Amino acid sequence: MTPLSFHLNLALLTLLTFTSAAPFPLSPSPTPALKPRKTSPGYGTLSLTTTGPVIHAVIDNPPINLWDYKLAHDFFSFLSSLNDTNTTTKVVTISSANPDYWIAHYDIHVIVAADPVKPPANATLIGQQLISSRTLLATLPVIFIAEINGRVTGAGDEVAVQCDIRYAGPAARLSQFEVGFGLLPGAGGLQYLVKLIGRARALEYILSSRSVDAVTAAAIGWVNKAFGSSEELGREVDSLAQRIAAFPQQALAAIKARVNVQRPSEVDLDEDLELFNQLVDTDVAQAAGQKYLRLSGEESGGAFELDVPDDIVQISS
């Protein structure tokens, strides 16, 4: 395996994983009334505000909210801060400051040997932080609500589907585009989509690399609900977050832990990652990655990126 492959650092993950058997902290239930938000500096590409036991995280990593070394570090650091038995946080909402993108996709430089990420970025660490973030989203006794109103592609969708609840607005476009590179979704997207939308639909969208809008995504189960405006989306996410946070933390944690019995197995998730690592090293994937970087203007957010995944067939021709 080359250094480009991002095998899971089991020691790191073991340290970070919050098992469902661990005791969950208790805190008095807040009143249902909305509380003033308090703003904190956040984590660079994430700005944070709090409303009682609810944290509102806003992704802002111009130009396309790329899952690069900055967002990978900040997202993982934020989730790690919640891995604390003394936390009073019950709900986290995750939205975007960019109207065109929620999280675009993985930094393609990570997988291209001929044009790798530049220091201080570290390809292996970016991958490890994605996989560790995936595990923390699933196992932390905190409820994560994705407020999606923009493009969600590849690794971005893999983060979205591993949130506990997904609400989508009129600009939402969800997709897995890895097939265009000769790859498969390797960070959980494949297994979670099968659980969410069923085998046949998962095959349809993963094999064709077609995107779905909010209404379609809600109809098939990719997201919970679709909303006709960004304002309505924001109001409904805030309302749901506050209502959930009004209930005892021990109940929220216990319910999430038991529902997690139905999540994909770690064995299947690890096998997807292993196969992704093998395919990344092939000539097909390397050539496709180089072509993507050229056509996208180095992931600069131009017309090509805006049309992903519809134009992803261009890198396979």
Image (tube, helix red, strand yellow):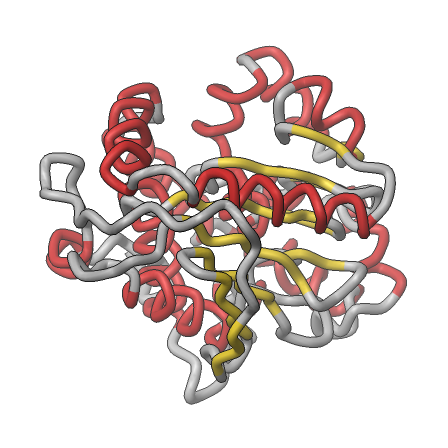
Residue at horizontal 63 percent and vertical 31 percent from the top: 223
Above or below, comparing residue 148 to residue 190 in the picture = below
Q: Residue furthest bottom?
A: 119
Please indicate whether residue 311 sits to the left or right of residue 19 in the image. Answer: right
- Foreground of the two, 154 or 289: 154
Residue at horizontal 27 percent and vertical 49 percent from the top: 28
Above or below, comparing residue 13 to residue 61 in the picture = above
Residue at horizontal 84 percent and vertical 42 percent from the top: 170
Image coords of residue 219 (percent x, y): 73, 18
Please indicate whether residue 56 sits to the left or right of residue 131 in the image. Answer: right
- Foreground of the two, 111 or 306: 306
Image coords of residue 270 (percent x, y): 28, 38
Residue at horizontal 84 percent and vertical 59 percent from the top: 304
* Quadrant of image for the C terminus: top right
Quadrant in which residue 11 is drawn: bottom left
Image coords of residue 261 (percent x, y): 27, 21
- Foreground of the two, 186 or 191: 191
Q: Is residue 157 visible?
A: yes
Instruction: Report the number of numbered marks.
Output: 0
Above or below, comparing residue 185 to residue 34 in the picture = above
Please indicate whether residue 65 sits to the left or right of residue 26 in the image. Answer: right
